[in-house]
Amino acid sequence: MLNVSDDRFALAEVFTIARGSRTHADVLTVELSREGARGRGECVPYARYGETLASVRAQIEGLPSDLTRAALQDALPAGAARNAVDCALWDWEAKAAGKRVWELAGLGAPGPMITAFTLSLDSPEKMELAARKHAHRPLLKIKLGTPDDMPRLEAVRRGAPDTRIIIDANEGWSAEVYSDLAPHLLRLGVALVEQPLPAGADDMLAEIARPLPVCADESCHDRASLPALRGKYDMVNIKLDKTGGLTEALALRDAARAEGFKVMVGCMVGSSLAMAPAVLVAQGAEVVDLDGPLLLAEDRAVPLFFDANGVHPPMPALWG
């Protein structure tokens, strides 16, 4: 039996990016029950990709209850719906076999990894205060992508002078703006810029200087995305809600590395259940951004554990 439910998790603070703000994480939870075992998965439908809670629910509810993970890859396109079902199937397979998912996938036992912590878009003054509050963290991710980004970045660097910083422009810049900003990003010690130009309008990245690594996010969904990224990006951001689940995420990671791309593993704003499968993909990644649970005021009953060593692998009661 395949069951789909809507779940809402309050955020600890308002979370803002260039496209808007939110106070809650609205997710879909899939629960698969077969032969005495239960598996769960979570997805975050994303309006940027034409998804809503209702449209993704309809995709999931249209699936046959006896669907296999192999058949699922062709039954649904890459996206949130396939992600939740794929991860529920992996969890179910592990529970039914009495093993962990990484054993079934032929992976080594995962360990903790340092994850970025995201500061949402705000006034320079408030972003500086937020940076001071989180200056103890080894990696901060800054949401930018507006005409007034430099004062914000300068403020964050003042607030966290020793922390490694990466930037997510969320498709908010033009090639000219990025070229103008790049020297200043280097001056302020930025280690990486994520999706500076809009997906589909990023060809200029192959023609302009890339003095610091550029990571594809909205431009990279699954393995089919890779040919268009060559010569434009240095890294790809793998998110399970884009790949359509753990199955394709692992395949994309291996294919990207084979083509010379570095790997970042990211997330939408969701609960620990959504992050848990991504922890497996993130093993060995150059950048890990699985801070969704850290942004929540409430989480799953058995959440992921975070400490000075980063995000730890999930307990079986959560997933996998």
Image (cartoon, rainbow, N blue to C red):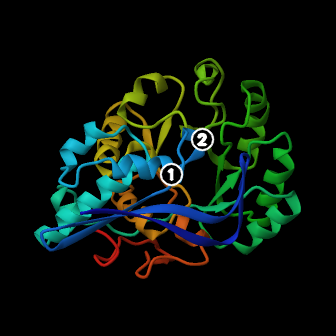
**Residue 159 picture location, percent across and down:** 79, 66
- What residue appears at the point 72 percent right and 37 percent down from the top-left corner? 172
The foreground one among 67 and 154 is 67
- Check the picture and name the quadrant holding the C terminus: bottom left
- What residue appears at the point 36 percent right and 33 percent down from the top-left corner? 223
> Badge 1, how many Cα within 10 Å: few under 14, some, many 20+?
few
198, above or below 241, in the image? above
Judging by the rendered image, the residue that carries numbered circle 2 is: 48
Residue 156 visible, this angle = yes
Residue 99 visible, this angle = no
**Residue 203 picture location, percent across and down:** 59, 20
**Residue 185 figure quarter:** top right
Judging by the rendered image, the residue that carries numbered circle 1 is: 54
**Residue 317 figure quarter:** bottom left
**Residue 254 picture location, percent across and down:** 30, 41
Q: Amino acid at mark 2?
A: Arg
Q: Residue furthest bottom?
A: 301
